[in-house]
């Protein structure tokens, strides 16, 4: 009997190519869908899960392989209005500028410089340039993320002001906040947020809109949040607000 | 028939594998390019209010802790025609009485300054800088005036770094990565940037880092 060699027929080859293409598209489609659901968060684990201020005074933090004792926070402490920058005299629109090239924050009310201080922006995940608005202020929250040696878990992050725009959504968790775990301001240190000395963050927190009503304060149409400009460079203009170069 | 179904299944898996590979490349590529390369920040200027007062030729400089609860005070006055005497004190909100930490005399041409990031995050240590024309010396102190092991009132971080024979020079100490870890940016002999290190003030150990903190 003659040995018969079976060769794949043309339509079988087509079927194989179609199957491979289908598999490729299937995976690509799932990947694309998942990407829209899980946008990059400044804090990859905590993201913005808890939108209420929380103080965990018995917890221990963890950063760069070091255990950190967070500051004790009393969420019931009354607001001291005398701490508000420029509360008694200032008028004009409030505007925060962050200069990524010099790691400097400038807070303006009208054309008056309210505060100038050093900050630490994103090193492990760049702080994205752009114009944002503060949408919620939390007196204290927990932030966690990173992996391996870069993992961090930080309770009682003080004076947190989350900001957003139409490109960087609220869920991505970028914020201005106090940082009690390092003191290297003037140099990039964070996972995307703008770290400040706690003493500076407290001043900005009480000054920035929406006006602080409670440990958790949301911006509303009546009380919109202060404009925050994250700039590649800030160009100073004598006697006027600076220019933000994105 | 059976073999063609088997081949189709294999083809489907191959296609999915290719899709996963491309997805992985996209994620890696995006992640790898996400860090924005910025020009090096200039040396930070003491921007927070640092009042200086001059009384009887005594110049005072202050450094506030990041949480605002403690203040380091350095008072400088002429000692001789060519030297200055510096005295360090700490006050806190809990105890406004000045606690004397240390005093030292330096040549007038090498002034001492309090850097912006002088305080450790837990307020247990601080460091100051002596500006020699050729290099900056960094000295770490305990904020409660207690002594380091070996009865040392302070650590000369620059000298201790040099003793480690890393092959690099200490470029700058920028601040604290953690309560006991100073960040050191080293430099090469030609002045170009070298690696970054942690210097642990409790053990005097040096840890080379895989990333730099310019």
Image (cartoon, coloured by chain):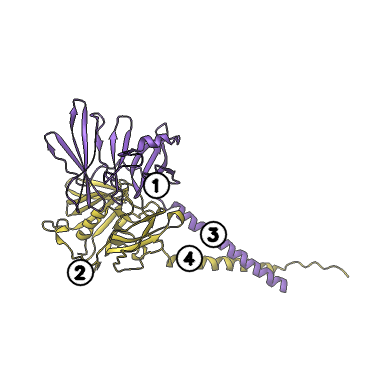
Do the residues at pointers 1 and 4 share their chain? no
Q: Chain of mark 3?
A: B
Element under disc 2: loop
- Disc 2 or 4, which lies upstream in sequence? 4
Mark seen at residue A32: 4
Circle nearer the viewer, 3 or 1: 1
Q: Which residue is mark 1?
A: B37
Whole-angstrom CA distance, mark 2 to mark 4, is 37 Å
The answer to whether mark 2 and mark 1 are in CB contact below 8 A is no
Q: Which residue is mark 3?
A: B22
- Disc 3 or 1, which lies upstream in sequence? 3
Camera-side residue: A207 or B205?
Answer: B205
Camera-side residue: B145 or A59?
Answer: B145
Which chain is painted in purple? B
The answer to whether mark 2 and mark 4 are in CB contact below 8 A is no
Taking the image as shown, residue A64 lies to the left or right of residue A221, namely: right
């Amino acid at each position: 009997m003659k040995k018969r060699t079976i060769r794949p027929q043309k339509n079988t080859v087509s079927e194989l190519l179609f199957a491979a293409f289908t598999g490729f598209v299937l995976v690509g489609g799932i990947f694309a869908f998942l990407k829209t659901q899980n946008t990059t968060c400044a804090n990859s684990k905590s993201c913005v899960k808890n939108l209420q201020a929380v103080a965990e005074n018995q917890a221990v933090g963890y950063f760069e392989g070091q255990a950190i004792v967070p500051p004790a926070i009393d969420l019931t402490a009354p607001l001291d209005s005398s701490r508000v920058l420029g509360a008694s005299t200032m008028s004009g629109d409030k505007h925060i500028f962050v200069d990524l090239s010099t790691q400097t924050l400038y807070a303006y009310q009208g054309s008056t410089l309210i505060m100038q201080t050093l900050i630490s922006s994103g090193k492990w995940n760049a702080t994205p340039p752009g114009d944002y608005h503060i949408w919620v202020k939390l007196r204290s929250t927990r932030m966690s993320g990173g992996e391996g040696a870069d993992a961090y878990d930080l309770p009682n992050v003080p004076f947190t002001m989350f900001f957003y725009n139409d490109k960087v959504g609220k869920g991505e968790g970028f914020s201005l906040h106090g940082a009690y775990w390092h003191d290297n301001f003037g140099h990039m240190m964070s996972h995307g947020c703008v770290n400040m000395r706690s003493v500076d963050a407290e001043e900005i927190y009480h000054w920035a809109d929406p006006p602080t009503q409670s440990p958790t304060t949301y911006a509303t149409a009546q009380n919109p949040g202060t404009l925050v400009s994250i700039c590649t460079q800030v160009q100073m203009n004598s006697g006027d607000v600076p220019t933000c170069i994105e | 028939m059976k073999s063609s179904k088997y081949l189709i299944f294999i083809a489907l898996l191959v296609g999915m594998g290719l899709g996963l590979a491309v997805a992985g490349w996209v994620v890696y590529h995006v992640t790898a390019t996400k860090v924005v390369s910025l020009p090096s920040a200039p040396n930070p200027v003491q921007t927070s209010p640092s009042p200086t007062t001059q009384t009887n030729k005594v110049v005072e400089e202050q450094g506030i802790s990041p949480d605002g609860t403690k203040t380091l005070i350095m008072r400088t006055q002429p000692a001789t025609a060519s030297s200055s005497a510096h005295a360090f004190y700490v006050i806190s909100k809990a105890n406004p009485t000045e606690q004397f930490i240390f005093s030292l005399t330096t040549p007038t041409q090498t002034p001492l300054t309090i850097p912006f990031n002088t305080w450790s995050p837990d307020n247990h240590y601080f460091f100051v800088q002596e500006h020699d024309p050729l290099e900056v010396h960094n000295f770490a102190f305990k904020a409660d005036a207690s002594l380091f092991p070996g009865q040392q009132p302070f650590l000369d971080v620059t000298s201790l770094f040099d003793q480690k024979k890393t092959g690099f020079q200490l470029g700058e100490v920028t601040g604290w990565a953690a309560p006991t870890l100073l960040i050191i940016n080293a430099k090469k002999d030609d002045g170009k940037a070298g690696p970054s290190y942690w210097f642990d003030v409790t053990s005097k150990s040096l840890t080379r880092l895989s990333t730099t903190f310019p």
